[in-house]
Amino acid sequence: MEAPDGSPSRVASEPPRTPYPRWGLPAFFVGVGFFVLAELVGTVLQLVVGDDAPDLMVLVGYLLVWAAFLGALAIATLTGGRRSFVADFGLRFRWVDLPLGVVLGVAVAIGAGFLENWIISMLGGAGFSNLPSRSEPAAWYVVNAVLGAAIIAPFVEELFFRGLFLRSLAHLVRGGLHRTRGRDWDPALQDPPRGRRIAAALVSVGVSAVVFTSFHMLEAAEPVDLLILAAGTLPLGVVNGILAYRTGRLGPGIVAHVTFNAFALLA
């Protein structure tokens, strides 16, 4: 079927195509570099301030890491994307994301709790958490724990690890820019062979979950504490990776992440 100008017309059922984003794994590694720089700056500030303002330094540490991740996301979308966190990284919500995310977040938190208790019973230790302590003054606890750890951090981390990193891996495994240029990122596209689609799902979900876990494990020093952190963050990373890949949006994963962190604060 031809258009009036003689060119092939688009089948009515075919979705419109928009320019394929040119960002990928390099943008993720820019974020890693920014993260390392943020950690160095935080270490220097900690040496300067000392132990006089621990609550303030927790907030400063959060702000530095968020700036690192958001900076990489901004560079990616502005220089090689569609200048939109919604279009590029799937920052979208639907009403169904709320109950779905809450249920999955609670389920992962309960499962992680059982696994952490088993690790402690087998290896010893007193338990470990990378979340702000309730011993902080009330105002600082609200800022650092409630607003920072339970609300803002999930948004930023899901954008970086599932919005940028997981999508970059999926693009790469599904065939790269030369195979999919001119198409939106969509896990449901049937262009690549089935084996490549399965590989893209497994690699992008699995690797992004492991890297997500590794970043959190940097906050622990003892081997048992590393295992305790991994027991919670790895299952969360896998569940949120599956949600992001299957739905094409970050909404359910963000809700699950918020629920998971809030559950940990209340436990």
Image (cartoon, helix red, strand yellow):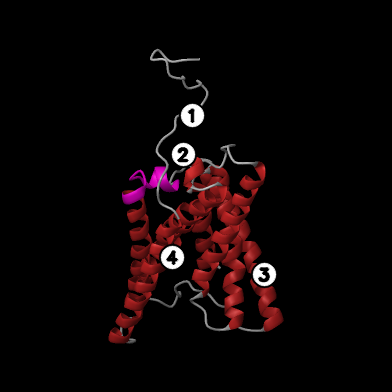
Q: Amino acid at mark 3?
A: Leu
Q: Earlier in the sequence, mark 1 or mark 2?
A: 1
| Residue 127 visible in the snapshot | no
209 inside magenta stretch = no
85 inside magenta stretch = yes
Q: Nearer the viewer, mark 2 or mark 3?
A: 2
Q: Amino acid at mark 4?
A: Ala
Magenta range is 79-90
- Which residue has dot 4 on it? 149
Q: Say few, some or many: other residues with alpha carbon within 10 Å of mark 4 (under 14 / 14 to 19 / 20 or more).
A: many
Indicate the quadrant where residue 157 lies: bottom left
Mark 3 residue element: helix
Q: Nearer the viewer, mark 1 or mark 3?
A: 1
Residue at image point 51% right, 42% down: 179
Mark 2 residue element: loop
The answer for how far apart the CA atoms under marks 4 and 1 are is 39 Å
Residue 15 got which mark? 1
Mark 1 residue element: loop
Residue 115 got which mark? 3
On the image, the x and y values in percent for residue 236 come to 57, 60
Q: Are marks 1 and 2 in contact (CB under 8 Å)?
A: yes
- Which residue has dot 2 on it? 184
